[in-house]
Image (spheres, rainbow, N blue to C red):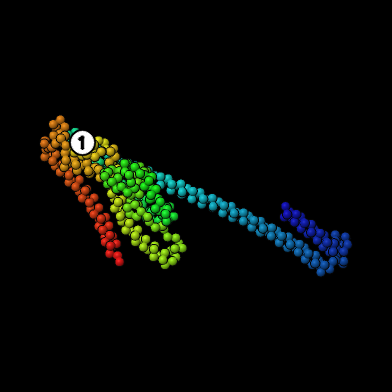
Amino acid sequence: MIGTVKSRSALLRIALSGATALTLFSASPAHALFGGGGNCAPPQTVSNAHDGTRDVIREEHEATRDAIITAIKEQTEDLTEKMEETTRRIIEALALGAAQNTAVVQQQTEAGRRIADAQELNETDRMRQQVRAAAESGAFDPNPFSCQLLDIFEAGRGGGAPMSGQGVTQQAVNRMNGNDAAVQEGGASVARSVVDARDEYAGFQGSTNPTTDWSLMLNEPTIDLSDPDMQNVLGWIVANSVDATPERAMTEAELSTPEGMARAAEAQQRLGRQRAAVETINMSLNMRTPVLTDDGTYAGMASDSLYNRPVPESLSELQQLDIQTVYHYAPGPNRINGTNGENGLESMTEVGWLQELHRITSINARINFIRLELENRSAITNALILAALSER
């Protein structure tokens, strides 16, 4: 619209200039029409008129050029903004698509892993059932429990007892580290927490002082660590035995002094020795952690021997080894004579005795390895005791 108005104004100015030039050129109407030559306008006047016309045309050209340049800039800026917005949206769409593809790939990978795990577990169970079916069909007679070594750990649990003892002894570790609330308060609060725990759990499983009674652990081959009270009692037994009244953790202000640094270094030395003792206790607890749900096999072995401890539904590795050991060295009447006069030790065949010897060898191999583990921990503990005794 602005360009149109400017164009009209320019044309008007050109017309007026032309009319003025024509008037100046012709001295009279007759001369203008018929070309009389005596009274023509001076050349300077005509030149001035043409100069005015050129100025008007130049200004119009400049105005038109400026308008075109401005329009091109505006279009260029608008196009640039649209291209940047389009590019940003394309990048966001690509990023979203990549994230979705990654999530799908992860889900597919996880699904594949679970399928593979299930296939391996099913194959293991299938092999176990095949061996058990052969034993029950009489292929392993007169050794009805020859397949029980396959089940010493629950299916899917791996090759050892779960490390559940760590959760029990962590209570004692927290106190030794100074992270317990009562220990942080220090002073009488530490002693009060020990006495309060003794009074709170008095009479637990018939013990007058359960927070110091190691028989609660050592007399039981299988311990139900899922019981919160049992966890707390065993935690206090460990804490009271290793360090009943530990020092609180050092503050930043105390650590900034030479005396505080010396105390912190001494605490580290003490804590290192205490943790060695705790790890030995951990192994003993782990051996008593339930790892197998008995299907009647171990209950039958206990009844066919002179085993004199209760057989719970869930058995630890230690109790499984305990039952198998008694089953071999202290057989009962059914074990010797067999059920209904069949499959007893008296009628053992060569194949049966080979199976018996294989089981005994396997049990002894496992017991020897456990003994090696315990001796390793005992060696470390004894070395630390020697170091403590040799301090000046």
Name the kind of residue labelled 1 in the image. Answer: Ser
Does residue 123 appear in the picture of this structure? no
Residue 252, placed above or below residue 334: below
Q: Position of residue 325 (x, y in %)?
A: 19, 43
Q: Which residue is mark 1?
A: 303
In the picture, residue 128 is in which quadrant? top left
Total marks in image:
1
Rendered image quadrant of residue 73? bottom right
Foreground: 61 or 303?
A: 303
- Residue 314 vertical position relative to residue 185 in the rendered view, above or below: above
* Residue sitting nearer the eye, 5 or 106: 106
Residue depicted at 51% across the width and 50% down the height: 92
Q: Do we see residue 345 in this rendering?
A: yes
- Identify the image quadrant of residue 389: bottom left
Which corner quadrant holds the C terminus? bottom left
| Residue 56 as seen in the image, left or right of residue 158 | right
Query: Residue 379 at x, y = what percent?
Result: 25, 57
In what element is the residue under mark 1?
A: helix
- Residue at left offset 59%, top offset 54%: 81
Which residue does the image show at 54% across and 50% down from the upper left? 89
List x then y, in percent, for residue 297: 23, 37
The residue drawn where x is 29% and y is 50% is 283
Q: Residue 382, position in %: x, y?
A: 26, 58
In terms of depth relative to the viewer, which is nearer, 327 or 191?
191
Mark 1 neighbour density, 10 Å: few (under 14) some (14–19) many (20 or more): some
**In front of the other: 268 or 335:** 268
